[in-house]
Structures are given as C-alpha cells and as structure tokens.
Image (cartoon, helix red, strand yellow):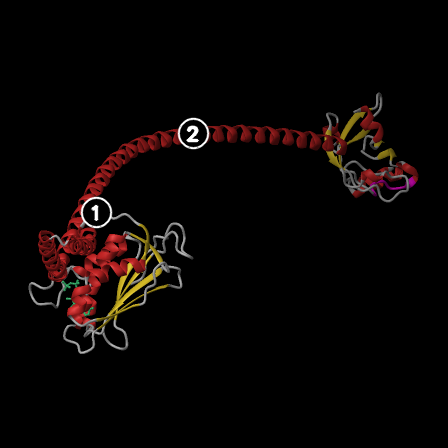
Amino acid sequence: LAQEVSTGPALIADGNGVVLLASPASWKYATLKPLSGEVIAEIGRHQFDGRAPGGLTLDVDVEAASVGTPVRLPSPGGGPEAPAALGGHDYLAFSRHLPESAWRLLVFANLRPVRAQALTAGALAAAVAGCLLLGFLYVRQRRRALRAQLESQALLQRANQALERKVAERTVDLSDAVSRLEAEVGERKRAVLELRAAQDELIQAAKLAVLGQLATGITHELNQPLGAVRTLSGNAIEFMKRGNLETAESNLRIVGQLAEQMGAIITPLKTFARKSPAVSSAVDVAHAVASALFLFDQRLQRCGVSVDNRCRAGELIAWCDPNRLQQVLVNLVGNAIDAMLVQPVRRLTVEAWRQADGRIALSVGDTGGGFSPAVRERLFEPFFTTKPAGEGLGLGLVISRDIVRDFGGDLSAESPPGGGARFVIHLPAGAGDATGSARPDQGAFPT
Ligand code: ADP
C-alpha cells in the first residue's frame, strides 16, 4: 500500500476541506466536498490572498476515507504536471489527521494494478476451473466410452455365441442335407444304371427286330450256296464210288469255298446281333457303311434300289462304337428302302464329309416320299410310326438318336430340295483321323 501511495496522488486539506498542497498541483485550492458560495467567499476573504477556492471539487468523503473509501477522481484539469493516470480512474482514498491541527493528509491508491491483479487471478481461476471442468468432462467421457466399449464387447460376445449356436445348428442341418443328398445321389446312380441296362435291352430288342426283317434275305442268300453244297457233295460221293477222285476233289474244294461264302454271310450277322456294351474306338465310317449295306444286299437287289456309296475306305475316321454305328445305319437304310418301295426312282445315297468344326458327318439319303412338316416334327418321338401295324414300332429313330448322342454326336433329319429324305449322323472325329484329335471332343451338336 505504501508503494501505491507513493505512486498515487496525495494532498493536504484544511479543516474546511480546501486542498492546500497537492500532487498534482492543479488540485491546489480544490475542495474535497462542494462548499456553498458564501463559505467559499468567506474563506477566500481571510485566506489564500483573496483567491476563492472551490474551482474544482474532488468529491471525497473524508470521514469514510479514514478507513479507506473508493473514489472517482476528476480529471486533473490539464496542468502539465498532472499524472495521466488521474483521469476518471477509481482510487482508494485514505485520510489521516495531521497531529495538532485540523489539517488532513489524503493519499489515493490507484486501484488499477489491484484490479488487473484481480482480473489475472480471476482469469487464472477461470482457466483452472476450465481445466478442471475439461478434466472432469474428459474423465466422464472416458468412463462413458469405457462403459460403451464394455457394453459393445458384451453385445459382441452375445452375438458371437448366438452365431456359433446358429452355425452349429446349420452344420447339423447341412450334414443332414448332405446325407440326404448322398442317399439321393446313390438312388440316382442306381436309377441311371437301371436305365442304361433297360436302354441296352431296348437296343438289343431293336437289333433282333431288324434281324427278323433281314431274315428273309439272309435265308435266300444262304439257300443258293446250300443247294450247291448239297449237289456238289452228292456228286463227289458218286465220283469217289466210280474212282474219279480228281473230280470228287474239285467238287469238295468248291464245297469248301461255298462254306466260306456262307460263313462270310453269317459272320456280320453274328457281329450285328451280339449283345455288347458300347465301347468307343476309332472307326472307319466307310467300313461301317459297307457292313450295313452288306446286310441289306439281298433286299436292295430285290427292291430294285441302286446304291450310290460315296464313302472311301480310310478317308474319315470317327470316334464311336462300330457295332452300334452299324445298327444306326441299318435302321436308316431299312427306313429308306421302306420309303422308296412305291417310288418309280429308287436310289440310296450314302456320303461322308468333314464338317467345318472338324467333326464327321455321315448321311443316308433316298428318293422316297420324304415327310411332311408335321411328321418331321414327330420323327424322334417314341412309338411314332406311319407304317402299317406289325411293320413298324416307331422306335428305330429314337434309339438311333440315343446311340449317336451317347457317342457325343447327334442325328438330324432333312428334307432335301430335290425331294426324298436325308438323315445325317454327326460324329466326333476319332484317333487316327487325318485331322481329327487323338480323343474326340464330346460336345453335343445342334439338331
Ligand atoms: P418305324 O420305322 O418303326 O416306323 P422309326 O422310328 O424308324 O420307326 O421311324 C419313324 C417314322 O419316321 C416312320 O414311320 C416314317 O414315317 C418316318 N421315316 C423314317 N425314315 C423315313 C424316310 N427315309 N423317309 C420318309 N419317312 C421316314
């Protein structure tokens, strides 16, 4: 406080409250309290060399100042020595009686530094409080986050447990489903095997039916050499009795040749009739065509059908079962002959070529009546036949298409522009074929 007093203004006032001495000097003759004009004039008359005081009133309660009172000091009045700090600032006024006089000493302590200190302390306190609040908020937030984390962990754990339970349930369901599927697959496999066996039986039955149709021709073909054998062997006996062994020997040689001829007729029949599972191999299509035509040799001649076989041995090799390919050809040739029976021109054309995609195509065409669009639609339907009862079963084409599809090929029917009918067998190229692959591609063909 002593320091503040020394830096603040100070004054000495007399018993009337008139400033006698002051720093700043401009306060000299100022009054502490407003005085009436008469008092001022009276004082002026007796003191201060006739100069009237009271030009400036400081408005200080002297009694209150004895214990210290805040005051608002007026502007110092423009004197050059007046401290700039005195303009309208708050001061704390202290007054003391000067011993043995009515005079008083008043000192003013500038409150600005104190206020600044208070403000600093306040700001500091506010900052500390702010920090504390922030700390508190942080801790609270942390706690909340921790609680949320724990809750989400618990939630996650519960979800995990639920998931594990579900997975376990699903696993049981799935293993049940797998067992059921395995059982079903087993069932299907058995069904497929049974179906295949039934198909094989059907194919065999169809073969035997064809054989039945061929029987007449074959009998006829065998009859001739058989008659010759009978005659030649009878003659041989006679010649031997007469001692003409040379002629007997020549007769017996011819008998042997005829037996071989009959064997050659029977062997393809045996091969054709054999019940065998389909086994694919490289097949010369010309060979399969020749075998099928050989079986029909008699019938073709009898019906006056001319054959135009354009297949050359060794040219085109397909990948299929030779026996079954022959069966398909027998079906197609048999149908072609049937279709041409009532036609004036009867010509059977068989040709083979390589398709753009590298596969082998083999066609059987005829000059028969062909088929109407309605019949063509139903050609491959089981039991569809236009032949009289007892002559057709309507299974030949269905079985033939099944056989060819088994090879990875297909069978299609066409109505050529010149009339008649044409069936085309599409086959995979086989090993050994000039341009074919070692193993055929098993893709299906469009029909
Ligand atoms: P099926 O010969 O026992 O009738 P297919 O399945 O072999 O049975 O033939 C079904 C039908 O297709 C025949 O009845 C016939 O109407 C018709 N068809 C087959 N081949 C020919 C052909 N080359 N020309 C005209 N129609 C044919």
Res. 153 mark:
2
Instruction: Report ligand 1 position as a quadrant.
Output: bottom left
Q: Is mark 1 within 8 Å of ligand 1?
A: no
Q: Main secondary structure of the magenta part?
A: loop
Q: Is 304 on the left-hand or right-hand side of 124?
A: left
422 to 97, vertically: above or below: below
Looking at the rendering, in which quadrant would you find the C terminus?
bottom left
Q: Is residue 246 visible?
A: yes
**Location of residue 250 by image quarter:** bottom left
Locate residue 377, reporting x and y percent. 20, 67
User: Label 2: how many residues lie within 10 Å, few (<14), some (14-19) or many (20+)?
Assistant: few
**Location of residue 423 by image quarter:** bottom left
Span of residues in magenta: 50-55
User: Label 1: how many residues lie within 10 Å, few (<14), some (14-19) or many (20+)?
Assistant: few
Res. 186 mark:
none
- Tag 1 and tag 2, C-beta contact below 8 Å: no
> Which of the two residues, 147 or 401, is positioned nearer the viewer here?
401
Structural distance between the alpha carbons of marks 1 and 2: 71 Å
Q: Residue furthest front?
A: 243
Locate residue 137, reporting x and y percent. 54, 31
Nearer to us: label 1 or label 2: 1
Res. 276 mark:
1
Q: Residue at x 63, y 28 (%)?
A: 128
